[in-house]
Image: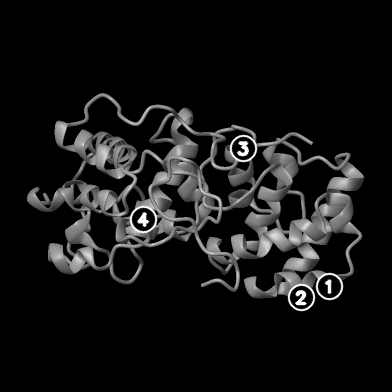
Amino acid sequence: MSSSTPGKSGRTAKTGEPGTTGKNVKAAKAATGAKASAPRKAATGAKAAAPRKVPKAESHLAMVRRARRINRELAEVYPYAHPELDFRNPFELLVATVLSAQTTDLRVNQTTPALFAAYPTPEDMAAAVPEEMEEIILPTGFFRAKTKSLMGLSAALRDEFGGEVPGRLEDLVKLPGVGRKTANVVLGNAFGVPGITVDTHFGRLVRRWKWTDEEDPVKVEAVVAGIFPKSEWTMLSHRVVFHGRRICHARKPACGACPIAPLCPSYGEGETDPEKARKLLKYEMGGYPGQRLSPPDDYPGKPAPALGNG
């Protein structure tokens, strides 16, 4: 079985790109600081910049340029962006991603250590007693359906792929419980194959940014794929999801603490007061643990607590 170092696959060593500003370079340095307060400075660096109103008649070319600039800005704010599921190999990432449906990555990460201790390989998981697996993954919700999917995909890996996770999208989506989103997560982070992961955060933000008004994830993926070069797809996905989880929340986005406010046509949907917005920041920007129990070395926040420890 091929393996992957957690959070490293699909990563890019570049944190800055042409067209960035001195202010943003400072934000990037702040974001990589060891103290939890440092990333907060990066997130609030935009308060002095007056948000501009994106014209309703913005051309497609202008939108593409703005979208690519947003990506460059996010690369500076989140140079440490990474998949927020703990995994040591493609099989673990595949299982963790299936478990992440309708729950948080944190809850999955707190659950998978016991799961992989009991069933370390597809062969082991395919032969599991359903009731015993259900008891382990109970905290992730929908445990019966997820157990059925995990045992089914494990059996398929055992019988059709020699116990190895395939590295092709067309093979992955044939596995029980695996759709394009899950397949792209695995391809991008376990195999280094570029992919766009359209989860709820990604879809919400690209619509707020007026890159597309599509609701269907497959159509969103196709539109965004046409805006960015393939080499950017995986890291773009991480940056957008990071931003959605930390600043651009679904119900109350922290607009006043957003470093890309000048580029956002939806500025004002959330809290615009800088001090009030700062209180809405989550994870390392707000000084709290992130989603992973074993984050990458360059992650500036705190590791999440194990299940039962907080």
Q: Give how far apart the Cα atoms at labels 3 and 1 are.
A: 29 Å
In what element is the residue under mark 4?
helix
Q: Give how far apart the Cα atoms at labels 3 and 2 are.
A: 28 Å
Answer left or right for 150 relative to 75: right
Of the residues shown, which amino acid type is indicated by label 3? Thr
First in residue order: circle 4 vs circle 1? 1
Answer left or right for 211 relative to 189: left
Answer left or right for 286 relative to 303: left
Q: Residue 132 carries which label?
A: 1
- Dot 3 corresponds to which residue? 5
Q: Counting other residues with Cα less than 10 Å from the Cα at mark 2, is it few (<14), some (14-19), or many (20 or more)?
A: few
Q: Residue at x 35, y 58 (%)?
A: 246
- Dot 4 corresponds to which residue? 284
Which image quarter: residue 271? bottom left
For the residues bearing labels 2 and 1, Cβ distance under 8 angstroms: yes
Residue 142 vertical placement versus 182 (above, below): below
Q: Give how far apart the Cα atoms at labels 4 and 1 are.
A: 35 Å
Of the residues shown, which amino acid type is indicated by label 2? Glu
First in residue order: circle 4 vs circle 3? 3
